[in-house]
Image (tube, rainbow, N blue to C red):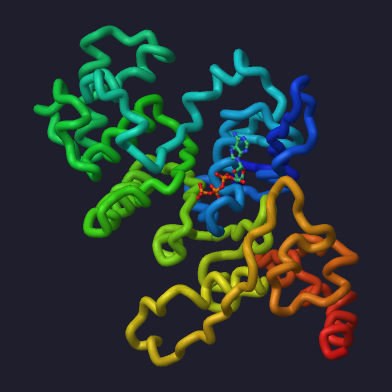
Amino acid sequence: MKPLVEVRDLKMHFPIYAGLLRRQVGAVKAVDGVSFSILEGETLGLVGESGCGKSTCGRAVLRLYDITDGEIVIDGRAIGSEDQMSLRRIRPTMQMVFQDPQASLNPRMTVGSIIGEPLDEHSGMSRADKQARVEVLMDQVGLNRAFINRYPHEFSGGQRQRIGIARALALKPKFIVCDEPIAALDVSIQAQVVNLLEELQDELGLTYLFISHDLSMVRHIADRVAVMYLGKVVELAPRDPLYEAPLHPYTQALLSAVPEPDPAQAGRKRERIVLQGDVPSPANPPEGCNFRTRCPRATDLCRRIDPAFREVTPGHWAACHLHDPELADQMAAEGAA
Ligand SMILES: Nc1ncnc2c1ncn2[C@@H]1O[C@H](COP(=O)(O)OP(=O)(O)OP(=O)(O)O)[C@@H](O)[C@H]1O
C-alpha cells in the first residue's frame, strides 16, 4: 500500500513579538522538524502530553497554517507551499474533526445546513441533491434524518460530535485529522464515537491522523503510533511494539502511567516512571536532546548532541542515543560515571 500522507521535516514556529514596535523577539517552536507518513486506510495515532504540539501538527498538515518549513504531500500532491487559493481545490480531500463539537458548530444553523455547508462552498449541487446527500450523511453517522431541521443545542454531546463527523465527510474526503475527537465527551459515549470512526474508515477507506492524549484509546484505534515531545516526534512504531517494548525513555514514562487494560496481564505491573520537572518552553527548548532535562537516563552526551531519529528495528524509529549503536557504549560509560 502506498502512503496517502507524507510529511517531511515539518516546522511550525509562531513568532513572539514584544515592545512598542512589535519586533519579533523569538518564536514558539510548536512543531520543530516532524516527519511521518500514513498509508492509505491506515490510522496513525499522535500522542504526547498537553502542549507538546499535537494539534498544531494536525492543523499544519492540513495547511490551516502557513507553515514555517517542510514538505507535505497528500494524495500525490505537494501542498507545503501552495497558497490558500490553490489549496481550496484540494481541501475536499482532507478534513478535520475537532475536539469540542459544541464550539465548532454554529448554534444558529440547523443540522442540515451545518452538514451541507461544505457542499455549498465546493460542489454547486441543487437544493434537492444537497438535501439527499445530507440525509445519506446523517444515516452514515447514525443520526435520525427526521432531525434535519433541529439546532445543535437540541442534541447530546455524542450526537453533536456525529454532526461534526457528518460535516467532515460531506465532500468525500480521503484523509481526516481527528483532533481529540472524544476528549470532551462522557466516558460512556467515547467508545461509541470511536467505533463509529472505525466503521466509517472500513466503509469509506478513510485514512486518519488520530490525535489524543489518551494512550489506551489510541492503542485501540491506531495501526501505528507517533509519540511527540516538545515539538518533535521522539518515537514511531507499529502499535504493539510501541506499547509492549517502547524504546524511548519518554514513551516508557508515558506508558508506565497507563493502567494495564488486560486483566490477565494486570499482575505484570510496569514500574511507574515519574518524570521530574515541567515541560520546558517550546520558545526556548534545551540544546541537544530536548527531553534530557526530564530524562532519567540522560548523560552529558545528551546535552552535547541532538539524537538522530533512526530506525532501530524495521519500522520502529526512535530519537535516543541509547539506541544508536555508535553512541550506546559512550552513554553507558557516561551513565556509570
Ligand atoms: N497560534 C499560536 N500562537 C502561539 N503559540 C501557539 C499557537 N498555537 C499553539 N501554540 C503553542 O504551541 C505549543 C503547542 O501547542 P498545541 O496546542 O499544538 O499542543 P497540544 O499537544 O495539542 O496540546 P493540547 O492537547 O493541550 O491542545 C504550545 O506551547 C502552545 O502554547
Q: Where's the C terminus, which quadrant?
A: bottom right
| Residue 113 horizontal/vertical position (percent) | 26, 18
x 72%, y 34%: residue: 16
Q: Is residue 278 above or below residue 243?
A: above
State the residue lying farthest toward the left: 146
Q: Quadrant of residue 276?
A: bottom right
x 25%, y 39%: residue: 141
Q: Quadrant of residue 277?
A: bottom right
Question: Position of 213 compared to 226: left or right?
Answer: left
Depth order, front residue of 298/83: 298
Q: Quadrant of residue 261?
A: bottom left
| Residue 292 horizontal/vertical position (percent) | 75, 68
Counting labels gives 0
- Ligand 1 image position (quadrant): top right
Question: Position of 87 compared to 220: left or right?
Answer: right
| Residue 108 horizontal/vertical position (percent) | 24, 19
